């Protein structure tokens, strides 16, 4: 067992200081729980130059079982089919071994697959393939009538994962009814089809610049939680999708993010002035997309 994981197991619930040094690749099985299982999940942060860098966001309905009435990115829990061995023959640009090495966990490729699948289901945008006919199977996919791997195989298509890049990892803190171990990915949207919500979990979808989204949060027009806010803070320091991917290609080291309040204050990054202030605490959140100096 990794030294960090071993030390974490010795912590009490109130001993939070060490968590700042928690291994960003710690197994979710070694994260302290409150009898709520931590489920693997994936989120897709779709980018496009329109012409300024913009991000695709959706509004959850007020009856959603998780982050109701919040503005977030498409995403959801990993499904069994996302782990299917069928994907060995249905993807390119990333082997299962390479995925495991990037995220330092087993079955890591399932996070990539889930992020793409959820983006089709929730906002009707195809990533990793330019075949818009895939959207004809959206309803069957949403309703569980067909599995994603079966749809791809039947249409004799494949998914190119080379341009879908992980940027952060967030583990839902204790206290809620659901907990997720979520990897966030970025990809550029090349779809010619306008995004459209599923009308169930999501009730609105829109393109917006990260700065404008943060301004709407500050004014109270949008409600967000720390993973969403931190992602927007990062992205507003970049001018284009090319710049984002260029930095990710340099393989920056993970940084732990600190929190003042989950939804009422902006998260803090290592270079921020008050990063280690006494009123902050280390989040179970790490990013390897740096927030660039302005």
Image: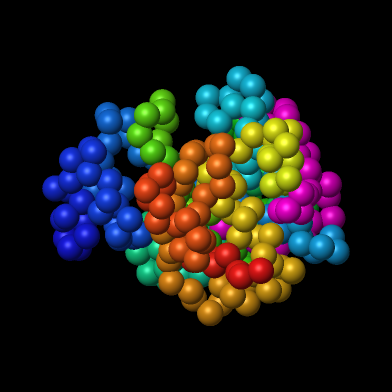
Relative to 36, 30 lies left or right: left
At 61% from the left and 20% from the top, the residue drawn is 63
Residue 233 in the image, given as x and y percentages of width and height: 62, 55
Q: Residue 242 magenta-drawn?
A: no
Task: Point out the stretch of residues depicted in magenta.
Answer: 185-212
| Magenta-drawn stretch contains 199 | yes
Query: Residue 279's quadrant in the figure?
Result: top left
* Residue toward you, 13 or 266: 266
Q: Report the residue at 27% width, 29% height from top.
A: 35
Task: Residue at 49% x, 39% y: name it.
Answer: 261
Rendered image coloring scheme:
rainbow
The image position of residue 96, as x and y in percent, is: 42, 65
Lateral position of residue 279 relative to residue 216, left or right: left
What residue sits 40% from the left and 56% below the top? 276
The quarter of the rendered structure image containing the N terminus is bottom left
Towards the viewer: 39 or 167: 167
Whether residue 173 can be seen here:
yes
- The answer to which quarter of the image holds residue 80 is top left
Q: Which of 243 and 129 is in front in this view?
A: 243
| Farthest top residue in view | 63
Q: In which quarter of the image is residue 244?
A: bottom right
Q: Quadrant of the C terminus?
A: bottom right
Number of numbered discs: 0
Against 27, residue 124 (above or below) is above
- The picture places residue 159, in percent across and down from the top left corner, at 61, 61
Image position of 294 with respect to 18: above or below? below
């Amino acid at each position: 067992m990794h030294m960090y994981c071993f030390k974490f197991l010795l912590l009490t619930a109130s001993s939070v200081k060490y968590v700042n040094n928690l291994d960003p690749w710690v197994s979710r099985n070694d994260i302290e729980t409150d009898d709520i299982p931590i489920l693997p999940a994936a989120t897709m942060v779709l980018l496009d130059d329109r012409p300024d860098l913009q991000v695709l966001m959706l509004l959850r309905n007020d009856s959603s079982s998780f982050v109701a009435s919040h503005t977030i990115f498409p995403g959801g829990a990993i499904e069994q089919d996302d782990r299917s061995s069928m994907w060995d023959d249905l993807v390119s640009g990333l082997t299962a071994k390479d995925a495991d090495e990037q995220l330092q966990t087993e079955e890591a490729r399932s996070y990539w697959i889930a992020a793409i699948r959820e983006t089709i289901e929730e906002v009707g945008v195809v990533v990793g393939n330019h075949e818009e006919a895939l959207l004809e199977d959206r309803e069957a996919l949403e309703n569980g009538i067909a599995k994603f791997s079966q749809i791809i195989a039947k249409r004799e298509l494949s998914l190119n994962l080379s341009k879908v890049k992980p940027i952060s990892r967030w583990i839902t803190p204790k206290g809620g009814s659901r907990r997720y171990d979520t990897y966030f990915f970025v990809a550029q949207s090349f779809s010619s089809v306008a995004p459209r919500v599923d009308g169930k979990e999501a009730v609105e979808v829109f393109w917006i610049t990260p700065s404008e989204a943060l301004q709407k949060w500050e004014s109270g027009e949008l409600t967000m939680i720390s993973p969403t806010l931190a992602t927007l803070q990062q992205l507003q320091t970049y001018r284009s999708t090319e710049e984002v991917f260029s930095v990710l290609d340099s393989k920056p080291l993970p940084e732990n993010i600190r929190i003042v309040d989950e939804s009422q204050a902006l998260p803090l990054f290592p270079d921020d002035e008050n990063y280690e202030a006494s009123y902050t605490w280390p989040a179970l959140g790490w990013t390897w997309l740096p927030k660039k100096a302005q």
